Amino acid sequence: VTNPNYVLMVEGLTVSFDGFKAVNDLSFYVEPNECRVIIGPNGAGKTTVLDLICGRTKATSGNVAFKGQDLLKMREDQIVHAGVGRKFQTPSVYEDLSVFANLELSFPKGHGVFGALFFKRDAEVRERIQEIAEMIFLGDQLTQKAAFLSHGQKQWLEIGMLLIQDPELLMLDEPVAGMSVAERKKTAELLNRIIADRSVIVIEHDMGFVADIATRVTVLHQGKVLSEGSMDHVQNDPKVVEVYLGH
Ligand code: ADP
């Protein structure tokens, strides 16, 4: 399954847990520069979909192609290496280390052996860290210990730790959970900047935030796509209204 117009193709994806299909014959396609938001009631299968794409959970059947590579045949670390970054709900940064050190540790390891190359690489790495730090609103706090950052800043730092690995697809699970209104606004700004040269899949509940970031929305229900399209389209889809009001 390859189509140059898609970064990610998910086709007929299914996983059964003891006969219960948490994700059931799911298909969707993500384009370059897209921010796809997955919404849906609790238990709809949202997190499981991300787990399947990043190789954390093994699919029962289906296809997941990322730039023509079959992700279902790859290990979690190979999928990261291929350019798929995943952020979980709770930030996991190195609390005792500085913002700079957190970003440096996440920098992909090069294979330079000679001193001269190291020097060149050092300067490049530093420049890249500065660039990413500014993007995540922490440009002035490179020496700050991560432990002293706010919860929202830690979330940004973790996004930075993914960005520094230069993924083509970023998957974020409720990135603004626990954030202040101001932090949510800045996170929307950040995501809109990120999709200038990458694609993003976000699981989100906050509909105001969804409206600020989504290129397209996929509504998941009982492991299947209930509705898909623009925010306007899915919000007015009678099937969606029924599922949400019925809860
Ligand atoms: P959502 O993220 O939309 O709230 P999840 O993907 O977490 O939904 O879960 C979908 C369904 O799959 C839930 O009913 C959940 O209990 C079930 N599920 C998820 N992971 C497992 C697992 N490892 N074993 C058994 N059931 C699971």
Image: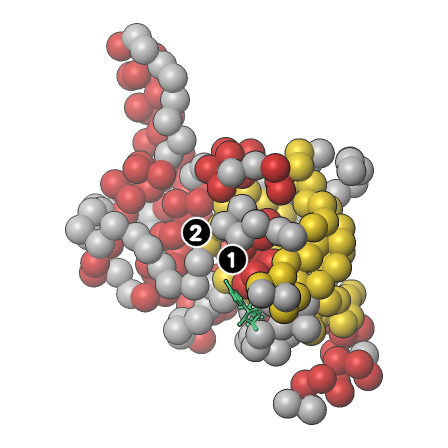
170, above or below 42, in the image: above
Q: Is mark 2 within 8 Å of ligand 1?
A: no
Q: Residue 151: where, in percent of width, then height?
A: 32, 66
Q: Nearer the viewer, residue 227 or 215?
A: 227
Tell me if 34 is positioned left or right of 79 in this view: right
| Residue sitting nearer the eye, 184 or 223 | 223
User: Residue at coordinates 63% horizontally, 61% vertically from top-left?
Assistant: 16
Asked if residue 28 can be seen in this view, the reply is: no
Q: Is residue 75 visible?
A: yes
In the current view of this chain or complex, which residue is farthest to the front? 18
Of the pair 42 and 116, the residue shown nearer to us? 42
The quadrant of the rendering that contains the C terminus is: bottom right
Q: Amino acid at mark 1?
A: Leu
Q: Badge 2: few (under 14), some or many (20 or more) residues near its Cα, within 10 Å?
A: many
Could you tell me which secondary element the residue under label 2 belongs to? helix
Q: Position of residue 203 (x, y in %)?
A: 57, 65
Q: Which residue is mark 1?
A: 172
Q: Which residue is mark 2?
A: 159
The quadrant of the picture showing ligand 1 is bottom right
Instruction: Indicate the amino acid at tag 2.
Output: Ile
Q: Earlier in the sequence, mark 2 or mark 1?
A: 2
Cβ atoms under marks 2 and 1 closer than 8 Å: yes
